Image: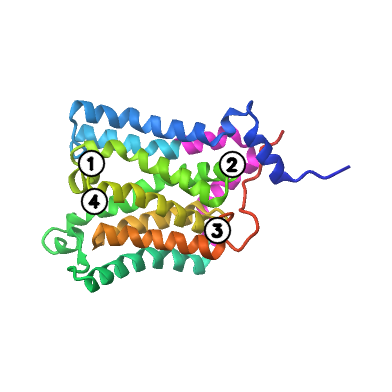
Amino acid sequence: MTGVDPQRGAKKRANDTSDVLGRWWVYLAVAVAGTWVFWLPAVVLGVRFDSAVGLGLLLVGLAIPGVSGIGFVYLYYDDPGRTDFWNRVTQPRRFGLRWLTVILLVPLGIGVFAGVVDLLLGGTGPSWGEAVTQFGTNPLAVLPTLFFATLPPILEELGWRGYALDRLQLQWSALSASVILGVVWALWHLPLFFIQGSYQHDAVGFGTTGFWLFMAGIVALSVAFTWIYNSTNRSILGIIILHGWVNFTAEIIVVPDLVYYALWFVLAGAIVAIWGATTMTAADEVPHPPHPAT
């Protein structure tokens, strides 16, 4: 009997019009709409995210991508796929010391290098964020930085990379999947620019140069995240650490947005130039999840 390629089978199922849950856009629509259900009322009602009600809306909205990702894993995959999901969340050996070093050095290096470039261009160079400058007089000033470096990456990445990226890469190249996910990921943040008490509203502002750099920069980050994800055998834990470290270093080392995001685009371009758009790794194919039983 002729053997069947499991990857081709998985791709066929992803393209099967009867298999609604296997479609990447269904998850992304649920994740974005689910979050906006809680964030848009804050916009309409003028609720601040630094209030008790606002904080609740923020946290529930943040949780939607991850909770939805887990839900879709259990709806679409059978036991091997579900086990694979939790293994990717809990097993550090998937990325090992080598890729952990890459995960830690890349965001830190970009922050430091952006500061140096700005200094060479006549700017003020890097400076310490409020979490550092205020820590001596107010140790609690570090709490917002620790929050953005821990909880959001966990809640988001269980879905963005934990579920959606796999589904996208069954139909698209690694680069195309990264761009699609990056655009949706950027749009997911949009309500935050209209809610007082959020970083996007208070520090960036809607329609500003910083706004466009932030939105475009997320797409570049998405490419770098896919590179790490595919290179670490689809490690969700590795991506959570990467996402958290990006947030932490950006809060600790303050540099001009233009130089900072430009360097992320340089990194994304280098990744594609060196490893190619198909997998963005040395492998001929990206790693895929165990396909559901038929």
Q: Amino acid at mark 1?
A: Phe
Relative to 216, 279 lies left or right? right
- In the shown orientation, is residue 283 left or right of residue 68? right
Range drawn in magenta: 68-93
- Badge 3 amino acid: Met
Q: Is residue 91 magenta?
A: yes
- Measuring from the top left, give residue 110's x and y in whole percent: 35, 65
Label 3 residue SS: loop
The reply to whether the C-beta atoms of the residues labelled 3 and 1 are less than 8 Å apart is: no
Closest to the observer: 192 or 159?
Answer: 192
Residue at the disc numbered 4: 144
Residue 186 can be seen in this image: yes
Q: Position of residue 51 (x, y in %)?
A: 18, 36
Circle nearer the N terminus (4, 3): 4
Provide the secondary structure element on which disc 2 rests: helix
Is there CB contact under 8 Å for labels 2 and 1? Answer: no
In terms of sequence position, does the residue under pointer 2 or pointer 3 come before the other?
A: 2
Q: Which residue is mark 2?
A: 82
Query: Residue farthest to the left?
Result: 137
Residue closest to the far right: 1
